[in-house]
Image (spheres, helix red, strand yellow):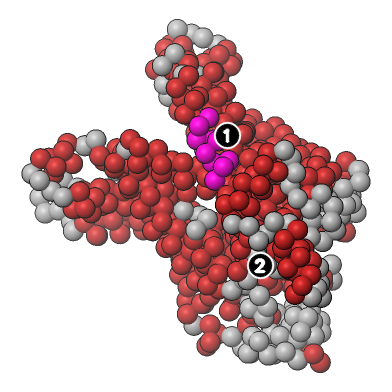
């Protein structure tokens, strides 16, 4: 990158990204699932909520008795299983993105304040983080959802306010490092306000660890939503959450294992893809391309 | 060092108090406690008398003071559902959860640490790849789903293990495996990165240069340094496993505090839920404190610093 006519930055980044196998694979899978969520109305062969008790538990197409009318058969209420699987991508992505945004906002704010100001302010922030960490995640979420009742909004809110701890820790230590740099001292010397320093000097420098944590937490939020819905306190029926589909298929899993295998596999694939994207972003953000872990 | 330990201790006490306040608020927010205590179909007069009897007509601060006094003396109130003392309910189920958490931790340590070590000693070998795949899957497979798949495969298709209940040790096999799957990746990756770091230090290079046997090198120089943070994580994970067993216990109908918490949540038995939450949070706080203190005692940089 020391050529006479340097390539534009974005093209260098794109070239490096396109060579990173994990990043490309993760991004492609996520793209497919995002498209599935956006185009769900076009892709779903049937109304995912339409119950027809005369068509309960129809077999999938690979079964001798299956047909292409319902490629993956129907569930215990006669609803088209493929349509419900497709619709489930919307819930996972929506919960993953929204809960991560809330958690990121809460955690990054606390981490910035603690890391920048240090001293007593930092001690208070550390105590808040320690309190949050002591509360068992799923158990606390279940108890809160039992009080406020599960819905898309309440699940997002509860997860957003439970998953901010890693954001806070990472942003705090990154801020402490940036805080000690000469350019921050220089900014203070030329009379920048604290708000300006936080926004102009500190925030851009903590962005890359923030994005990596965001991918981890998005994966965690998707897993947590599925678990809560599976346990019956997340999204209530007739929602098509993948966790709820597993819970509904549970009674039939000995005869029709695909009813739990398929929604579970989708969760796993999405989570692995998000983690791969995160690992890729971390590798690409570090200036030394070690190519290992 | 005294300073480090003292600070941790003060924070732990503050956290314990805060968690108790959170638990107390959860119970008050969950609905009208007096109506719950008076039972279903109680007349307004009965509800009022229950309110006075249990002191729920007093100011919140007075209620909280009384409640914390009871909590400190081990009185966690009674279940709204069965009338049983909550402390007894928790204590009678604690052994099951403790066994499960300890088994799962042992399993992850016994597999995770050697795997992480070997992976670090032979980067990019098949065992390193295996450790990476295990970590990736361990982070991505939801435990409720893994539990069901294990039930179908080992309990029903192969008929090797029982699939629900907690009567014999065999009942713990599948739950332990499920729970360990969530704690293993972290321990393994931390061992691996700790070893890699230790192996790249100057003192290891020096030891190697003076011709120290590879085995002595690992045992004396690399391993102790790599394992310090792993031990701390193991202590913390024991706390996480205590609270994280709710999913595993409910899928396998394992009668521990996780299943008790889940059932109590479903039937709105908030005195029980609140007590379990506080109990798990206190256990977690105590374990992290223990890990910090042990770390300070072992690590000369902190001990002498």
Is residue B83 rendered magenta in the image? Answer: no
The residue drawn where x is 58% and y is 40% is: B16
Q: Is residue A202 left or right of residue B19?
A: left
Q: Which residues are magenta?
A: B9-18
- State yes or no: discs 2 and 1 in contact (Cβ < 8 Å): no
Q: Residue, x 36% and y 40% (percent of image)?
A: A122
The answer to which image quadrant residue B235 occupies is top right
Residue B31 got which mark?
2
Q: Position of residue B64 (x, y in %)?
A: 61, 50
Residue at 65% across, 61% down:
B57
Number of residues whose C-alpha sits closer than 10 Å to that of mark 1, classed few (under 14), some (14–19) or many (20 or more): many
Number of numbered callouts drawn: 2
Is most of the magenta stretch helix, strand or loop? Answer: helix
**Real-space CA distance between mark 2 and mark 1, rounded to the nearest whole angstrom:** 33 Å
Say whether disc 2 or disc 1 marks the residue closer to the N-terminus: 2
> The residue tagged with tag 2: helix, strand or loop?
loop
- The chain identifier of the residue carrying mark 1 reads B
Asked where in the image residue A199 lies, by quadrant, the reply is bottom left
Q: Which residue is mark 1?
A: B288
């Amino acid at each position: 990158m020391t050529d006479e006519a340097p390539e534009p930055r974005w093209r260098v980044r794109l070239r490096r990204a396109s060579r990173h196998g994990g990043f490309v694979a993760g991004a492609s899978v996520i793209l497919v699932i995002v498209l599935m969520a956006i185009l769900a109305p076009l892709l779903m062969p049937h109304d995912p909520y339409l119950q027809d008790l005369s068509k309960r538990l129809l077999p999938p197409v690979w079964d001798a008795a299956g047909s292409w009318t319902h490629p993956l058969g129907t569930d215990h209420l006669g609803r088209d299983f493929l349509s419900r699987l497709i619709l489930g991508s919307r819930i996972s992505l929506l919960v993953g993105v929204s809960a991560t945004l809330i958690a990121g906002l809460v955690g990054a704010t606390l981490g910035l304040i603690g890391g920048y100001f240090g001293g007593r302010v930092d001690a208070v922030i550390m105590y808040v983080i320690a309190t949050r960490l002591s509360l068992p995640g799923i158990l606390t979420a279940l108890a809160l959802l039992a009080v406020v009742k599960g819905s898309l909004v309440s699940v997002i809110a509860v997860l957003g306010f439970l998953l901010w701890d890693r954001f806070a820790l990472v942003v705090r230590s990154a801020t402490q490092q940036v805080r000690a740099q000469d350019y921050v001292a220089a900014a203070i010397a030329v009379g920048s306000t604290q708000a300006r320093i936080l926004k102009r000097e500190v925030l851009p420098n903590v962005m890359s660890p923030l994005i990596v944590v965001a991918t981890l937490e998005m994966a965690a939020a998707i897993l947590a939503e599925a678990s809560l819905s599976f346990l019956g306190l997340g999204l209530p029926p007739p929602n098509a959450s993948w966790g709820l589909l597993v819970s509904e298929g549970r009674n039939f899993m000995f005869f029709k294992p695909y009813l739990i295998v398929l929604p579970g596999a989708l969760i796993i694939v999405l989570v692995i893809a998000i983690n791969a994207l995160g690992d890729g972003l971390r590798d690409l953000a570090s200036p030394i391309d070690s190519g290992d872990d | 060092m005294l300073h480090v330990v003292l600070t941790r201790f003060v924070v732990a006490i503050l956290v314990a108090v805060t968690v108790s306040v959170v638990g107390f608020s959860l119970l008050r927010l969950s609905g009208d406690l007096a109506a719950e205590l008076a039972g279903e179909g109680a007349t307004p007069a009965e509800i009022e008398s229950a309110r006075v009897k249990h002191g729920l007509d007093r100011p919140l601060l007075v209620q909280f003071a009384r409640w914390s006094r009871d909590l400190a003396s081990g009185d966690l109130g009674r279940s709204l559902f069965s009338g049983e003392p909550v402390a007894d309910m928790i204590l009678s189920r604690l052994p099951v959860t403790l066994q499960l958490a300890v088994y799962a931790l042992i399993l992850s340590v016994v597999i995770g640490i050697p795997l992480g070590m070997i992976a670090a000693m032979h980067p990019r070998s098949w065992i390193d790849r295996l450790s990476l795949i295990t970590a990736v899957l361990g982070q991505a497979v939801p435990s409720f789903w893994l539990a069901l798949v294990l039930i179908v495969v080992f309990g029903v298709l192969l008929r090797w293990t029982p699939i629900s209940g907690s009567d014999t040790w065999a009942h713990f096999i599948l739950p332990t495996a499920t729970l360990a799957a969530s704690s293993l990746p972290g321990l393994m990756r931390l061992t691996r990165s700790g070893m890699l770091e230790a192996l790249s230090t100057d003192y290891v290079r020096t030891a190697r240069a003076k011709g120290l046997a590879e085995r002595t090198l690992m045992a004396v120089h690399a391993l102790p340094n790599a394992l310090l943070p792993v031990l701390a994580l193991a202590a913390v994970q024991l706390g996480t496993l205590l609270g994280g067993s709710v999913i595993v216990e409910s899928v396998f109908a394992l009668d521990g505090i996780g299943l008790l918490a889940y059932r109590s949540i479903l039937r709105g038995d908030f005195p029980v839920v609140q007590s379990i939450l506080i109990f798990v949070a206190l256990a977690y706080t105590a374990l992290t404190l223990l890990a910090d203190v042990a770390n300070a005692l072992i690590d000369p940089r902190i001990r002498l610093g």
